Amino acid sequence: MSKKWVYLFEEVEEAEKYAGSWDGVRGLLGGKGAGLADMTRAGLPVPPGFTITTEACNAFLANNQQFPEGMWEQTLEALRKIEEKTGKKFGDPSNPLLVSVRSGAKFSMPGMMDTVLNLGLNKETLEGLAKLTGNPRFAWDAYRRFVQLFGKIVMGVDGEKFEHVLDEWKAKTEGGQDTDLTTEMLQEIVKEFKRIIKEETGKDFPEDPYEQLKMAIAAVFNSWNGRRARDYRRINKIPDDLGTAVNIVTMVFGNMGWDSATGVAFTRNPSTGEKKLYGEYLANAQGEDVVAGIRTPKPIDELAKEMPEAYRELQEIADRLERHYKDMQDLEFTIERGKLYMLQTRTGKRTGLAAVKIAVDMVKEGLIDKATAVQRVDPNALDQLLHPMIDPNAEVQVIATGLPASPGAATGKVVFDADEAEELGNKGEKVILVRVETAPEDFHGMAAAQGFLTARGGMTSHAAVVARGMGKPCVAGAGDVLIDYEKRQFSANGVVVREGDYITIDGSTGRVILGQAPVVEPELTGDFATLMEWADEFRTMGVRANADIPRDARVARGFGAEGIGLCRTEHMFFEGDRIDAMREMILADTPEARRKALAKLLPLQRSDFAGLFREMDGYPVIIRTLDPPLHEFLPREKEEIEALAKKIGVPAQKIYDRIEQLHEFNPMLGFRGCRLGVTYPEITEMQARAIFEATVEVKKEGINVFPEVMIPLVSDVNELNLQAEIVHRVAKEVMEETGVEFEYKVGTMIELPRAALLADEIAQTAEFFSFGTNDLTQTTFGMSRDDAGRFLPLYVERKILPDDPFQVLDQKGVGKLVQMGTELGRKTRPDLEVGICGEHGGEPESVKFCYKVGLDYVSCSPYRVPIAKLAAAQAALGEAERDK
């Protein structure tokens, strides 16, 4: 007996028994198939159908695109069962059964794979459908859609060729809409579509319904490996080996007249989280019309007036499904001659704002508990709420308004095609992708753009759904935006915007603004603050911030940072005239001359540190001594060199000579970090004095100060001993001079593999470790972060590496060094404080790893503090769940 590849919707319990859990069912039948089966079990109005499993897809792809043994026979048997239920027969001219063929992976991938509607139509069944319904126009409209979709998706014809024909015919009608096309027009359109297919493929359009079904199933399987699906999985970190299921569902028709409709609904607003049925529908239309933006849909509220009975039933089903799944649901429905059918339920994608509100509201409603709420919100989704928004008080030039399809603001150069968006985005340029409407094949460009603007489409259009999933702003359906692709420009209310010009889009209001609009900082209030309070109840690992100036420290405290994990003192030297004193020090020939130049910097550094201590009252502040190579502080251009020589009174040739002396072939591994302090101990002396004098100054103000001095780039305990000796001596001197006692620590940044390997020795002196995972990644992989962009994307794409190791901590390699260093250090010093301060400190998966290996804290940029806090809480909850 061959393996079971096909499950009827009512066989959900058999699927659950085989898969072992509901999550297993979703893996076997895909999210769409599992949802349809579950709704069928609950007695909801679902058209009869069946699902071909993801296992069949994987077998097909692994077997040279051949159906696995027994799959086609099981498909035909399931088709016969549907025929019995519906009283219709597949391919029967008098009473034809038509089906849709839809993809459905375990994880929702909106628009990334393919769907074919009205399958089973040919010359004979078309006539039967027309007679059966008494509506020849409906039958020909269904056939036109089928030929168009099948030609594009299954036979690989460029979809724009069909759209061009359709637009030409619509232009001949009075209303200009697809619903204005007559039966005769539709017949001519179908002829032209078939001619295009023959010209493009050399093959006739298939007439045999069973051949159509075979080809469509194969096309859906193959769409799993299509570019847009691969890109989506890469960006959303979805495994490649899951495969997609294929759902064969009896067709119900929303285009059967004005008492029919099709739509998409969410049980709550996916942009704001408001508890109200939200969505769009189109009367006398089929499903793809809503998401493709062919006509501008109506808000779901209007359905209550147009078809009140269907709306009431939809509302009841939406409430029931949300209570069942205990989460916001994304629904697809069709109304055929007044009767409602449910075609999908799945967990709805939502913005960060909506995710927070829905989680908090559902706790208040008693649907979920606090722990579930904290675990449900994706930490990365918070990023959308933590970035500046358009200043409401700014005067801006609004040139158009569309639908607020995905919140947030973005500024960038206008581009009109996805390839260019990707090209410029990869170069680091910020772009806004402007399209009449986006399609799944634009995904790679959408991934590279800051946001999207479309002239057509609604709140559930492709652009809107993808934008919300990515957390990017989108303005959709901006009807005043008239795009001319040939001239590479668009006009809006008399304003012409050319490719390369800057615009700003406000996805929260739908505004399109000329130029680069000013922005304001976000605040933590309301539901966000509530969720963060709950996260803090469960979180056990600390979260600090990387901050160099008081303003950054203030932002960090506002977001709940529990100290500063990294203050980079070198950034302070680049401000104003400070750079001149720094350059004097570098050009000095004797320790005395260096001390004289450093004396000018001492009060400035002291003031900087005092400002940080005031902001972090009661919390630790880790200050890293000078790290970068000295050549970075010297001018490069001839004019700058000669101006500096004149300003500080030294010959220009001396500056040229010093630049030459400091030149290094590999500065990252050269004369930097503690090597500077060992060679020029007076630098460490000045910085230690500035730290401790600021400590005394602020302590006298009644502020609690906990300074921690961090020595960078240590590879041997002897280096640390020399630097720690200076710090301890200066601390003692300052205490004696001021009569003020204070606590402090001396530690090191572990950013070299040798330091991690010798952590037990280094901990004899170091009172804390902070893993500098940016440099530790560079030195472990032997690659420069600045140059690796040439090949790392290819490494990730080809699965050589699972992620860019500069964005997500390499747990197997770099992570092993972090774990080893922590364990070795604590063998020597059990109370050793350990954290990380690289960019990984704000990346959720890296934060969870840090929790797992026992770090005391992570430190990240101020705006990622809430992300790190939520990830840390989820890590603690995950461990508690495993321990049950």
Image (cartoon, rainbow, N blue to C red):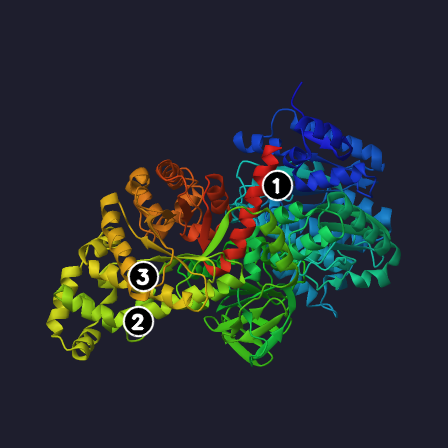
866 or 137, nearer to the observer:
866
N-terminal-most mark, 1 or 2: 1
Say which amino acid is labelled 2.
Answer: Pro
N-terminal-most mark, 2 or 3: 2
- In the rendered view, does 677 fall on the left or right side of 836? left
Q: Quadrant of residue 207?
A: top right
| Residue hosting label 1 | 220
Q: Which numbered mark, 1 or 3, is in the foreground of this view?
A: 3
Location of the C terminus by quadrant is top right
Q: Which numbered mark, 1 or 2, is in the foreground of this view?
A: 2
- In the rendered view, does 36 fall on the left or right side of 788? right
Other-residue count near label 3 (Cα within 10 Å), few / some / many at <14 / 14–19 / ≥20? some
Residue 735 shows which numbered tag? 3
Q: CA distance from mark 1 to mark 3?
A: 74 Å
| Residue hosting label 2 | 603
Q: Quadrant of residue 475?
A: bottom right
Say which amino acid is labelled 1.
Answer: Val
Q: CA distance from mark 2 to mark 3?
A: 18 Å
Q: CA distance from mark 1 to mark 2?
A: 68 Å
